[in-house]
Image (tube, rainbow, N blue to C red):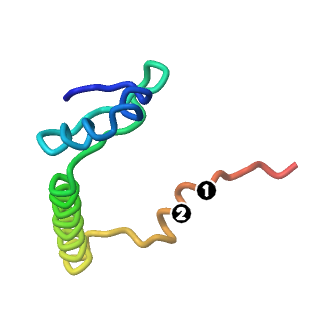
């Protein structure tokens, strides 16, 4: 993935827009990565993949609940609570 400084991205914004049509571009500020700029097509594809993964996980969770393979939330929270000793 190509990398640009934030200053370069700002001063050459038109070039950045052309570059992201080919592949995402990482933007660094103070030597650290802070953002990735991508084409709208890549963004939409990423969002579609995320939605499909969420649907898959929801279907799996639904099957687990239907098959009784779950632990009630109250039991989970109770097991996580810290029992403080009485003074």
Q: How many marks?
A: 2
- Residue 11 at x, y percent in the picture: 40, 31
Q: Quadrant of residue 62?
A: bottom left
Q: Which of 65 and 84 lies nearest the eye of the viewer?
A: 65
Residue at point 74% right, 50% down? Answer: 84
Which of the numbered marks, if any, corresponds to residue 77?
A: 2
Q: Is residue 38 above or below residue 8?
A: below
Q: Which of 40 and 80 lies nearest the eye of the viewer?
A: 40
Residue at point 26% right, 76% down? Answer: 65
* Element on which disc 2 rests: helix
- Residue 53 at x, y percent in the picture: 19, 61
Q: Is residue 9 above or below residue 52?
A: above
In the displayed orientation, state which residue is furthest to the right: 87
Q: Quadrant of residue 43?
A: bottom left
Q: Find the distance from the CA under tag 2 to the CA under tag 1.
A: 6 Å
* Element on which disc 1 rests: loop
Left/right of residue 59 with respect to residue 36 in the rendered view: left
Left/right of residue 79 with respect to residue 27 in the rendered view: right
Q: Which of 47 and 43 lies nearest the eye of the viewer?
A: 43
Q: Is residue 61 above or below residue 18?
A: below
Q: Residues within 10 Å of mark 1 (few under 14, many from 20)?
A: few
Q: Residues within 10 Å of mark 2 (few under 14, many from 20)?
A: few
Q: Quadrant of residue 37?
A: top left
Confirm or deny contact between disc 2 and disc 1 (CB under 8 A). Answer: yes
Residue at point 46% right, 70% down? Answer: 73
- Residue 21 at x, y percent in the picture: 15, 45
Q: Which quarter of the rendered picture does the N terminus lie within?
A: top left
Q: Which residue is mark 1?
A: 81
Q: Which of 54 and 31 lies nearest the eye of the viewer?
A: 31
Residue at point 25% right, 36% down? Answer: 15
């Amino acid at each position: 993935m190509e990398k640009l400084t934030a200053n370069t991205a700002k001063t050459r914004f038109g070039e950045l827009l052309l570059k992201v049509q080919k592949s995402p571009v990482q933007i660094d500020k103070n030597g650290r990565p802070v953002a990735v700029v991508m084409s709208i097509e890549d963004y939409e594809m990423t969002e579609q993949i995320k939605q499909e993964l969420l649907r898959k996980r929801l279907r799996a969770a639904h099957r687990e609940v239907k098959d009784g393979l779950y632990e009630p939330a109250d039991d989970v929270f109770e097991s996580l609570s810290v029992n403080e000793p009485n003074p």
